[in-house]
Image (cartoon, grey):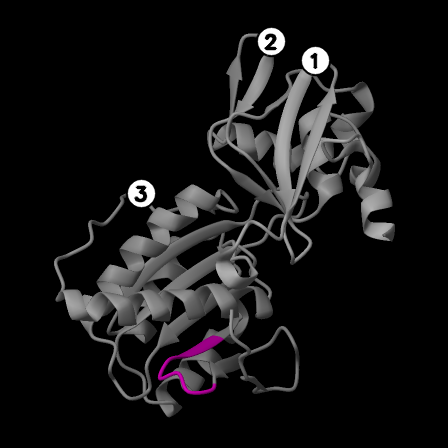
């Protein structure tokens, strides 16, 4: 990935308050803020040019589980937020992506809405509150690359704003530089790679223990494990749980705890094919 210059503006001087962000040489922009500052977020949006947009409602988990998210698109975002404020109680933050020069059309936002929902379902980093999956409408082939670039910047900016619901690409898009690791214990076998950003991607088909230790009921990752089962990322097959898709965890320890059903030090549990621990590999 190439280097990028990102500008972050805090409208009220607070890191979690109404704020906007932009990437140098990109026509798009994002405004975000907590629910109680929705008016300030809309004010930032309108002063920047407004127009058609794709937006996210996000509700944080208080128990270590997955955040809840809703994806929508609109060309009347102020009215749409008022509707959500009346009908949805769970959301706490609003994030709005748009193009101040009005280059993002309604057709484009509908495409972005569809691929955001599709890819959030794949990553499994949130519980989607959308009741339907919108289909991608036909758009000119020459517009697809531009919209995919817009999506890439959504993925880049969301975690910087505090919403880590997508998984970004690896550096240079190559897995060859990523450390391949294994976890084999308690009759389970898992394979993963340590990404250059420190996250750990566990591969589809890896197994996890079905049961949990009694102490795990109070563990910070207990809720996350339950959520992964709930959304179908972990499926019971016989006496084990199986990863139905690749899944990227925030750290090696998070992955190890979920797989083993108890507190675990990922730097010790994960090893390379020669049996050397991740801790020793990192020390080198």
* Residue drawn at (68%, 43%) of the image: 63
Residue at position x 15%, y 56% from top? 137
What residue is rendered at 47% in x and 53% in y? 89
Report whether 174 appears left or right of 137: right
Q: Is residue 225 above or below residue 207?
A: below
Q: Return the residue at label 3.
A: 131
Nearest the eye: 1 or 208: 1
State how far apart marks 2 and 1 are (Cα): 10 Å
1 vs 3, front mark: 1
Examine the image and state in which quarter residue 143 appears: bottom left
Membership of 27 in magenta stretch: yes
Secondary structure type for disc 2 = loop
Is residue 26 in view?
yes
Left or right relative to 216: residue 188? left
Tag 1 residue: 187
Q: Is residue 62 above or below residue 98?
A: above
Q: Is residue 147 highlighted in magenta?
A: no
- At a point 60% along the width and 65% down the height, the residue shown is 162
Is residue 128 among what the camera can see? Answer: no
Of the pair 151 and 198, the residue shown nearer to us: 198
Residues rendered magenta in the picture: 24-31
Q: Which residue position is annotated with label 2?
A: 239
Q: Which residue is the extreme one toward the top? A: 238
Image vertical order of residue 72 relative to residue 37, above or below: above
Residue 79 horizontal/vertical position (percent): 29, 71
For marks 2 and 1 on the same chain, the one whose residue lies earlier in the sequence: 1
| Prevailing secondary structure class for the magenta stretch in the rendered image | loop
């Amino acid at each position: 990935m190439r280097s990028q210059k990102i500008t972050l503006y805090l409208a009220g001087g607070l890191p979690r308050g109404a704020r906007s962000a932009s990437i140098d040489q990109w026509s798009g922009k994002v405004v975000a803020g907590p629910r109680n500052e929705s008016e300030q977020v809309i004010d930032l949006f309108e002063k920047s040019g407004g127009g058609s947009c794709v937006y996210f409602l996000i509700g944080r988990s208080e128990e270590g589980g997955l955040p809840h998210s809703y994806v929508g698109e609109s060309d009347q975002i102020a009215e749409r937020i008022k509707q959500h404020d009346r009908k949805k109680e769970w959301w706490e933050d609003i994030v709005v992506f748009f193009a101040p020069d009005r280059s993002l059309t309604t057709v484009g936002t509908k495409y972005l809405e569809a691929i955001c929902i599709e890819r959030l379902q794949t990553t499994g980093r949130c519980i989607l509150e959308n009741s339907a999956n919108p289909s991608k409408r036909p758009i000119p082939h020459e517009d697809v690359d531009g919209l995919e670039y817009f999506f890439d910047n959504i993925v880049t900016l969301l975690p910087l704003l505090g919403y880590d619901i997508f998984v970004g690409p690896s550096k240079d898009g190559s897995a060859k530089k990523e450390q391949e690791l294994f976890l084999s214990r308690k009759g389970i076998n898992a394979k993963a790679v340590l990404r250059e950003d420190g996250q750990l991607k566990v591969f589809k088909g890896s197994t996890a223990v079905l049961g949990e230790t009694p102490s795990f009921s109070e563990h910070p990752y207990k809720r996350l494990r339950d959520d992964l089962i709930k959304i179908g990322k972990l499926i019971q097959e016989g006496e084990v749980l199986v990863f139905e898709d690749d899944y990227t965890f925030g750290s090696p320890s998070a992955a190890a705890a979920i797989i083993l059903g108890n507190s675990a030090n990922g730097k010790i549990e994960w090893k390379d094919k020669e049996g050397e621990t991740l801790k020793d590999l990192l020390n080198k």
